[in-house]
Image (tube, rainbow, N blue to C red):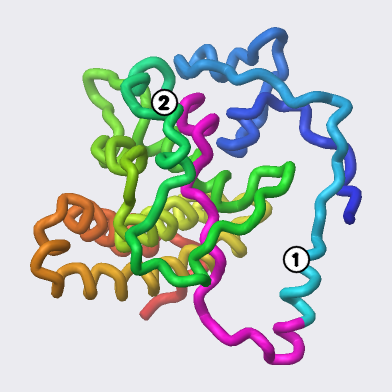
């Protein structure tokens, strides 16, 4: 157990978006100005302790060379509270109440390494990346001159099954987007983004060779997002050198 110090006083959405919150009561003005529903603030008396038992075990195994697979544990893309908060009333038609839908399920060929790991009381890096990408790139207030990218994603991500290629591609893109903000965890986010990108390319190659999956809209969505990662996010990343 590690004491991580005084918790941030910002609202939950500002912390997920990694921006400074004005901490206005009862709701912050940043959420109001961006036309987002402020989810409120965390309990000030919440225990600020992080369980690092699993991380310690993994570091020990890595030091002894006992890690047998390059596949890492996969966490949910985004929990239902995160998506409901960011999406607002526009996406009330999504089936948030169905326990089968959240966290999203991958197709049956998922390996044991793809099992979800237990969630801590703090937002994981994957959840931060997912919330940031949804709020900044997909579900944004529409104006005459601006709109979000890939507005088909919420429909796929709320389905009963998400294809492995779309799952891995979404992970890679959202983590790379978070890394480009150059936050405290930027280098870790880009490291994990590159790992998901490699697995996404493998999954897409496998999908386009399958006579059924090649016709799936999720496969097309994964290809489009791979192009976005390579042409838009990867070339702007400070962690990727020339050539």
Q: Residues within 10 Å of mark 1 (few under 14, many from 20)?
A: few
Q: Position of residue 3 (x, y in %)?
A: 90, 49
Q: Which residues are magenta?
A: 61-87
* Relative height, residue 168 to residue 103 (above, below): below
Residue receiving disc 2: 87
Q: Earlier in the sequence, mark 1 or mark 2?
A: 1
**Residue at image location 39% in from the left, 15% down from the top:** 89
Q: Which mark is residue 77?
A: none
Q: Residues within 10 Å of mark 2 (few under 14, many from 20)?
A: many
Q: Within the magenta stretch, is there residue 70?
A: yes
Q: Within the magenta stretch, is there residue 10?
A: no
Q: Quadrant of residue 18?
A: top right
Callout 1: SS: helix
Which mark lies nearer to you, 1 or 2? 1
**Residue at image location 44% in from the left, 66% down from the top:** 196
Q: Quadrant of residue 213?
A: bottom left
Quadrant (top left/top right/bottom left/bottom right) for the C terminus: bottom left
Q: Which mark is residue 54?
A: 1
**Residue at image location 35% in from the left, 68% down from the top:** 109
């Amino acid at each position: 157990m590690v004491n991580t110090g005084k918790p941030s006083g910002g609202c939950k959405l500002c912390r997920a978006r990694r921006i400074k919150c004005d901490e206005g009561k009862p709701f912050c003005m940043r959420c109001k100005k961006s036309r987002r529903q402020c989810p409120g603030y965390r309990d000030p008396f919440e225990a600020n302790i992080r369980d690092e038992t699993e991380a310690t075990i993994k570091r020990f195994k890595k030091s002894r060379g006992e890690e047998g697979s390059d596949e890492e544990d996969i966490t949910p893309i985004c929990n239902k509270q995160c998506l409901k908060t960011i999406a607002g009333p526009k996406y009330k038609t999504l089936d948030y109440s169905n326990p089968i839908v959240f966290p999203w399920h991958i197709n049956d060929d998922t390996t044991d390494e793809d099992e979800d790991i237990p969630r801590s009381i703090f937002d994981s890096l994957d959840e931060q990346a997912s919330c940031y990408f949804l709020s900044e790139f997909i579900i944004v207030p529409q104006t005459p001159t601006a709109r979000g990218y890939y507005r088909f994603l919420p429909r796929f991500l709320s389905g009963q099954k998400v294809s492995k290629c779309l799952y891995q591609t979404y992970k890679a893109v959202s983590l790379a987007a978070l890394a480009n903000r150059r936050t405290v965890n930027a280098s870790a986010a880009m490291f994990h983004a590159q790992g998901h990108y490699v697995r996404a390319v493998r999954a897409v190659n496998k999908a386009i060779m399958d006579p059924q999956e090649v016709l799936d809209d999720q496969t097309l969505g994964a290809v489009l997002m791979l192009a976005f990662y390579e042409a838009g996010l990867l070339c702007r990343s400070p962690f990727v050198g020339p050539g």
